[in-house]
Image (tube, grey):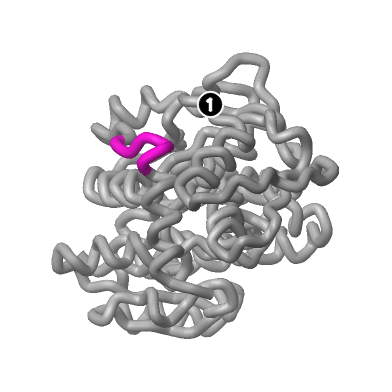
Amino acid sequence: MRVLVTGGAGFIGSQIADAHAARGDEVTVVDSLVGGSRAFVPRRAGLYEMDIRDPALRDVFAKERPQIVNHHAAQVSVSASVKDPLLDADVNVLGTLRLLQWCAEFRVEHLVFASTGGALYGDPEVLPADESTPIRPLSPYAASKLAAEGYIGLYQRLHGLHACCLRYANVYGPRQDPTGEAGVVAIFSRALLDRRPATIFGSGEQTRDFVFVDDVVRANLLAADRRIDGAINIGTAKATTVNTVYAIMARAAGVSTPPVYGPPRAGDVLHITLAAGLARARLGWEPKVDVEAGLRATLEWFRQRPA
């Protein structure tokens, strides 16, 4: 297949590009390289250093004629979205809308969109949350992903675009940026290995559904291959506190220093886990990597790459 991956030099997108390239697909990557790395782009892939909001993205579609588009380019930080909701919407809503225009014009066969279950449902009354859970965004980031899903649904109805919105839990693993405001596992990894204090915002008893990046990559390929439409949660249904994550990683790093606690951050949910029954039924997907093994693998990846 001819596959175009936006954000294909970033944390998740680059590993999806790797997986497509490894099985022989023709891969094109579009990435601004603001948060991604050229080193993560598969050697066999073409790279366009470009923002998805750039009108010249149409020329990429005209030249490459992708059959599958995997859309991972985004503003991904909840806290950054609270500070600058206009930028968040510009990238996540208007950037996605431009992409949808070209998908419709050039008859893309299927779109796989990276959405968020970790933020979209807010603080649900019933956990784990399934796809029928009321959507109650608590941050501009969640609202922008919801708006993008809305436009995707519109393009399905207006233009017959086939699309799957994968609603991720908290994805972690190798290649995640430890310098940004998103990705607590990457931030802990770098701080622990550098023997620097690690900060937990809030009590640390807030719970998350941590899903390993390898499992997420597998879900993306299944969605592309099976041409599944609609929204599907990608999570483990298992709750892990941030304090537990720190304790596991500190032991693995040989660090006994406790974390530093800061005030809770606006926009963060308190408790979220995602039911993955629909992913099992429609994609034949279920998570394979448990959280302790995944955390240790992530820490080891960072250990091999000193800052």
Q: Is residue 163 visible?
A: no
Residue 31 in the image, given as x and y percentages of width and height: 49, 76
Mark 1 = which residue? 239
Specify whether residue 163 is painted magenta. Answer: no
Q: Residue at x 59, y 53 (%)?
A: 188
Q: Is residue 111 visible?
A: yes
The vertical placement of 175 against 250, above or below, is below
> In this view of the protein, which residue sits in the foreground, 86 or 187?
187
Q: Which residues are magenta?
A: 288-293
Specify whether residue 291 is painted magenta. Answer: yes
The vertical placement of 44 against 81, above or below, is below
Name the element at disc 1. loop
Amino acid type indicated by mark 1: Ala
Q: Residue at x 37, y 23 (%)?
A: 277
Q: Is residue 3 left or right of residue 187?
A: left
The vertical placement of 44 against 179, above or below, is below
> In this view of the protein, which residue sits in the foreground, 43 or 7?
43
Q: How many marks?
A: 1
